[in-house]
Each structure stands twice: as structure tokens, then as C-alpha cells.
Image (spheres, rainbow, N blue to C red):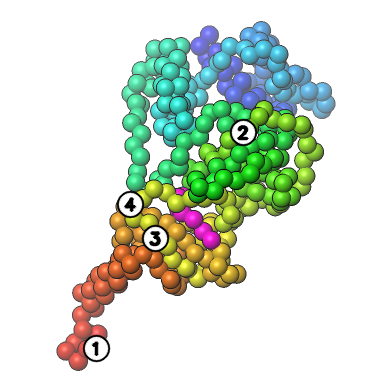
Amino acid sequence: MAQSSARVLTLLSLLEARQEWQAEALAGRLEITTRTLRRDIETLRDLGYPIDSVRGPGGGYRLGAGSKLPPLVLDDDQAIAIALALQTAPASIAGMDESLARALTTLRQVMPARLRTTTDDLQVTALRNYWEFSAPPISASTLRAVGSALRNRQILAIDYEPVDAGHASPPRQVEPYHVLVWAGRWYLVCFDLGVQAWRILRIERIRPRTHPGPSFTPRPLPQDDIVAYVTHNADRGDTPAHWQCLGSAVIDLPASVAAQWAPGGSVVEPVDATRCRLTLGGWSWAGVAGLYATFDADISEVEPEQLRDAFAALLHRAREASASQFPRTPAGQLS
């Protein structure tokens, strides 16, 4: 009975992972006969899972859209994965800490004793590293409004919180297309109807004005690779992270290149086709200078003075380290 139940759970996982399965391939994956597969399919149907039969050569199955949510059934690996995810989820959404803790408690209550013991053995304390460049938390209500507009292809009326609190921006109407999370930041790719241009907005700065409005007809995306469009785009609403040391310099790299490799919490501003100004921070001036060095490009117009001093100090240390590795002769030549 236990083996049969475990097999049915695996069958459910496979059906959820792929839109459609050919019957013989599914039976082969489970190492059972097609007759046994049919019995297991009927077991899932009896539990309330809508599984459709697919006609055609050999026949097949797919998980249909149900009118009600059947009992949640997880195999061992899925239950452990969810428990770990709940413990290590970053605090990106405001007010989610308590909900995550309650969800983990609920999950543990319905786990078999053997699984509960395993998850107890895997209790994790997630610590923030200084270089994670955490972003401001996002309102859950904002996410719900954005998600609803995305799902239903509806225009979203918003206020977009400006970087400078003293300069209010006018309301916007946008067509939302994609949400991407990168370097701890949540981005919305949308088409701004007011300026008739594509925009990348930081979701924590979005304030929905009303419920999603009328529907819209999707237009071609600005780039086929939407991930590259965001990661290579300097104009994505980024703001400097709150570091005790914050510096700025012009680097001899195109803005699209710097935007791809700049750490979260930094700002890239194009200067011309081959240069950009990069603003970033760290817990020490030497750390900030070290981040600039990772770009392996010429640097100029460095601000503030403390950052220039840090570059000079690093240069002195590098020369000292080089001299100790390759000592010079009295004549000044390397030995």
C-alpha cells in the first residue's frame, strides 16, 4: 500500500511538470505497465484531480483545470523543499514574515512523523550578508494588483514614487507584461501609455491608484529576450542602496555592459556610447574601490575624495605586494 501511494504521488508530480504525457512514456517513467498506470490515474481522479485523456496514437494524459481545489498531496522531496523554501525565503514582501512562519507551522502539522523529524533536523536560520544589497520590501497589495493586471491583460493606473521625494511625478497608465526578480529587486516591464514607450519600473515604488482598468491587446515586446532586456538596461529605476560609503565614477564601458554586471543597489547612467557613470556603495571605501576594480576598465571623475584616497591606498598596497614577490636589486632592477 505504501509503495502504491508513493507511486501515485510521483505520478501526480509528473503530470504537474509537463503539459501532456504519452501513456507509454509515462508508464515507462514510473516503471509500471500501462494497465497499472490506468488504475493509478483512476485513483487520482477519485481524489478529485481532473485528469483528461488525450486521444491519438498510443493515447495519453494531462492534468486538467479543476473547478475545485483537491486535497494537497506532496511527495517527500516536495514537502522538504517547501519547508526549506519557507525558512530561507528573503523578506522581499512587507508583512510576510508572520505568514511564512504560519505556513511552515501548518505544513508541519499535516506531515507524517518521519517527514516532520526530517524537516526539524533541517531547521535553518537565514542570515543577511552585507553584500546582498537588499531592496526595500514590497507591499503585498501592490503585488496583488500588478498580478491581477498581468493575468487579465488590463491597464494599470499607478503613481510611481520618485527617487527625489520633493519632485512628484504625474499618474501613469501602463500595460503590464512581465515581472522579473533580479539581484533582490522586483521589476515590471510595461508599456507606458502616457509617453508611448516601454518602461522598466521598480515594483516597490508602484502605488496602484484603482483596480485594474480596461483590457488591452498585447503588443510585440521590445526585445525577444526579456531577461536580457532588463539586465542590460541601465534605465530600470535603480536607486543606490543605503551604504555608509557611497561613491561614483565614470568607467570606460557601455552602460549596457555595466548594467549587466553592476551589483544590486547600484546605479548606471550613460555618458556616451562607450562610457557610463556608475554609483555604488559598500561598508568601507576600500570595498567600494575594489568593486570598481572588478570591471577591469579605465576609471575617471572619481567622487568623493575618500574614494580617491581608497584607490591610492589600494595602489600602494598592490605595489608593496608586488615588491615583496619580486624584490628589486640595488640598481632598481627586478632580481
CA gap, disc 4 to disc 1?
Answer: 42 Å
Cα separation, mark 4 vs mark 2, equals 32 Å
- C-alpha distance separating marks 1 and 2: 68 Å
The residue at which mark 2 appears reads as 208
What is the secondary structure assignment of the residue under circle 4? Answer: loop
Helix, strand or loop for disc 1: loop
For badge 2, the amino acid type reads: Pro
Question: Picture coordinates of residue 283 (x, y %)?
Answer: 31, 52
Mark 1 neighbour density, 10 Å: few (under 14) some (14–19) many (20 or more)? few
Left or right: 334 in relation to 128: left
Give the labeled residue for mark 3.
247
Report the magenta residues as a range: 263-269
Q: Earlier in the sequence, mark 4 or mark 2?
A: 2
Structural crowding at the residue carrying mark 3, measured as other residues with C-alpha within 10 Å and reported as few (<14), some (14–19) or many (≥20)? many
Q: Position of residue 40 (x, y in %)?
A: 65, 14
Q: Which mark is residue 244?
A: 4
Residue pictured at 37% horizontal, 21% vertical: 118
Quadrant assignment, res 11: top right
Amino acid at pointer 4: Gln
* Mark 4–mark 2 CB contact (< 8 Å): no
Residue extending farthest to the front is: 166
Residue flagged by tag 3: what amino acid is it? Gly
> What is the quadrant of residue 304 in the picture?
bottom left
Q: Amino acid at mark 1?
A: Gln
Image check: 116 left or right of 7?
left
